[in-house]
Amino acid sequence: MSFRVRPFERPDTESVIALWHAAGLTRPWNDPRKDIERKLQVQPELFLVAVDDDAVVGSVMAGYDGHRGWLYYLASDPTRRGEGIGRELVNEAERRLETLGCPKVQLMVRPDNVAARGFYDALGYESFDIWATGKRLIADT
């Protein structure tokens, strides 16, 4: 492995945001800087980055609410796909969640993101027939 996984540090902010843009994870209604700041207030040790030397090549945000764990913002540098970056980030996030006593981890993938769905299938994640819904409490824009 030519990269290592470690907790996010504030100087990683611009690199992580650029990675999220390159990986197609950003949406106009979510301000990535605000998402980072919010995560740093709650379980910051579950915000992980993969780095090669000083370059950020992957990220994942994990969280645990006492009932379920969640994964968000899993990304790897598109030019480095297939090197195991995403797999290692998921493995480390799962390990940290399990250490907290988390019995199950879930995530959301947009239906048209076939590559991500295949990636998670290969890691043993099962799709659910559910209706996902949400409500914004604080507008980012």
Image (cartoon, helix red, strand yellow):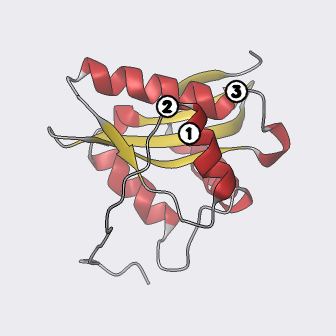
Q: Quadrant of the N terminus?
A: top right
Give whichever of discs 1 and 3 has the lower sequence position: 3
Look at the image and tell me in which quarter the C terminus lies: bottom left
The mark closer to the camera, 2 or 3, is 2
Residue under label 3, please give it: 84
Q: Residue at x 55, y 73 (%)?
A: 27
Sort mark 1 into few (<14), some (14-19) or many (20+) by Cα contacts within 10 Å: few
| Position of residue 99 in the picture relative to residue 9 (left or right) | left
Disc 1 residue type?
Asp
The local secondary structure at tag 2 comes to loop
Question: What residue is pinned by disc 2?
Answer: 124
Q: CA distance from mark 2 to mark 3?
A: 15 Å
Residue 13 in the image, given as x and y percentages of width and height? 57, 50
Q: Is residue 20 above or below residue 61?
A: below
Of 82 and 92, the residue lying toward us: 82
Residue at the limit of the structure toward the left, as seen here = 66
